[in-house]
Amino acid sequence: MLPQLLRPRALKPGDLVVIASLSGPLHAEYEPDLDEAMAVLARMGFRVRRAPLLEAGRSHWWSAATPAEIVSEFNALLRDPEVRAIIAHDGGQTAFGYVDLIDFDAVVADPKPILGYSDISLLHLVLYARTGLVGFHADLATRGLGMHWSASSPARQAQLADLYTRLLTSPTPIGPLPTSPSWECWRHGRAEGRLIGGVINRIVFNQATRFALPLDQFEGAVLFWEEMGGLSAYVWSYLHVLRHAGILDRIAGMVVGVPYAIDGLDSPTLPEIVLDVLGPRDIPVLGNVDFGHAGPNLPMPTGIRVALDAQQRTLSLLEPAVR
């Protein structure tokens, strides 16, 4: 049974957006990128604040703090009525350490947009599975709004700012996402269904926990995924895990992000890997879509119904992400 979709309240001008260390630490050399991210959000019309753990030099192993400290701050933000949205400063390797400590009742009582990709995609999957919350698989603050947006052309920055503002503030469907020449049709076809996905390793790992999404939640879904690092053989293996789990037999379509720093994609190529694992499953596949670690992210709101036309290379959001 599909979860009842839980849409956050639409943001208004002047609402408070908090940037938080939900996983990795802030390194001092990235302070200018964080400052730029705060400026981007301010230009969108929001008040912006850094959460206390977002402090250069603070760290615990590979994390900004211990999992208990991170989730304590995260839960406080979820419970604070002044905080209207939370955006992760960066990804990392920490969310698995605290997903069982999240205050899910606070999420249901006051759903708010949570933005981020990489490790943060795990939070989107867990919160969607437990509460139905629409998760905003979208740019991180420091690495995305600060770093990748700044490296883009002024026209692209304006396009992204408009897209993110409409997504967060307007209770009307976005419609077609802006396309780019990188988009490729890997298998023809059309599909409509709910977006579910994230970093492929997080999808696979999460399905091994008690926070796994039941198979029926993948029925008719459009699976979106991206990956960074590692080997092409890992991607092949992750896809086979999804096949063995029955997920690939349930989905209606697939959208693949731009791969980043994956070794061995010369032969076989990523399209060859995907089609090899899919085998005879006749579903549309749209590839090389601009989301993931490689650069600015088009938002992929978890749980929102989309229309995919791989041959025409279009992906449209059919429902609003906020209410």
Image (cartoon, rainbow, N blue to C red):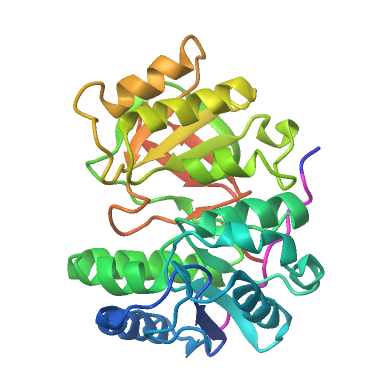
Is 293 within the magenta?
A: no
Q: Residue at x 66, y 39 (%)?
A: 208
Q: Residue at x 67, y 53 (%)?
A: 126
On the image, the x and y values in percent for residue 289 come to 34, 43
Q: Quadrant of the C terminus?
A: bottom right
On the image, the x and y values in percent for residue 255 come to 44, 36
Span shown in magenta = 3-13
Q: Main secondary structure of the magenta part?
A: loop
Q: Nearer the viewer, residue 9 or 97?
A: 97
Q: Quadrant of the N terminus?
A: top right
Question: In the image, is residue 316 above or below residue 27?
Answer: above
On the image, the x and y values in percent for residue 167 come to 51, 64
Q: Nearer the viewer, residue 234 or 6?
A: 234
Question: In the image, is residue 217 above or below residue 236?
Answer: below
Is 8 within the magenta?
A: yes
Question: In the image, is residue 253 above or below residue 86?
Answer: above
